[in-house]
Image (cartoon, rainbow, N blue to C red):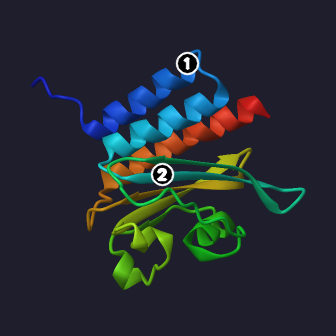
Amino acid sequence: MKNRRPTPEFRAVCNAADIMAGRYAYQGKVSRILDAILEGTDAHRGVLRIYDAKDKGIRLVHMSLRDIKHPPIIEIHSPKTGKTGEVFQSGKTLVENDLVKAGVAGVTRDAGLKAMVVVPVKRAGKTIGTVDISSKNLGNWTPSRVRAAEAVTALLAALEGAKA
């Protein structure tokens, strides 16, 4: 059997798992986990949104940036609008490898981001939020990068469940 080097996606998932086991506060873990997936998937912006079922609004938003000079603006909207709303409603991962062709506008495109994946954050089978990860690279979301984003999102969901 050949010695194979671990892929960046595999390292990102391993780093996120190590962070989960670390002694960081909740917000520190979220930040470090988002940073790990950005690095491992060659992405540039990651946003975690957790929605509050009682108030029908957002309870938690966290953003990490990598190599972006654009001001850190987060779109705060209802879980019923936009691409994140589609994922929140369907509970299924959405991949857009060309945001222009997909008709995505706003802050994401304004920051020079060209591709994104939006993954549902689930607890007990119910979607409680979304993670959207965007890249400046057209066609960035290969199947292995999507799987890594989904695995790290599952870790974020477990972290959110442990906090609740």
Between 112 and 14, the residue placed more toward the observer is 112
Q: Is residue 12 above or below residue 121?
A: above
Amino acid found under the numbered disc labelled 1:
Ala
Q: Position of residue 18 (x, y in %)?
A: 47, 21
Between 124 and 139, the residue placed more toward the observer is 139
The secondary structure type at the circle numbered 2 is strand
Residue that carries the numbered disc 1 in the rendered image: 21
Q: Position of residue 126 (x, y in %)?
A: 73, 53
Q: In the rendered view, does 35 fall on the left or right side of 26?
A: left
Q: In the rendered view, does 82 fall on the left or right side of 137?
A: right
User: What is the CA distance from the residue labelled 1 to the residue labelled 2?
Assistant: 21 Å
In this view, the residue farthest toward the right is 54
Quarter containing the N terminus:
top left
Q: In the rendered view, does 142 fall on the left or right side of 16?
A: left
Q: Position of residue 65 (x, y in %)?
A: 43, 48
Q: Is residue 8 above or below residue 133?
A: above
Quarter containing the C terminus:
top right
Residue that carries the numbered disc 2 in the rendered image: 46
Question: How many numbered discs sit on the rendered protein?
Answer: 2
Residue at coordinates 35% horizontally, 84% vertically from top-left? Answer: 101
Q: Position of residue 57 (x, y in %)?
A: 80, 61
- Label 1 or label 2, whichever lies nearer to me, is 2
Residue at coordinates 61% horizontally, 56% vertically from top-left? Answer: 130
The secondary structure type at the circle numbered 1 is helix
Between 43 and 127, the residue placed more toward the observer is 43
Amino acid found under the numbered disc labelled 2:
Gly
In this view, the residue farthest toward the top is 23
Q: In the rendered view, does 23 fall on the left or right side of 149?
A: right
Tell me if mark 2 has few (under 14), some (14-19) or many (20+) residues whose alpha carbon lies within 10 angstroms of its own: many
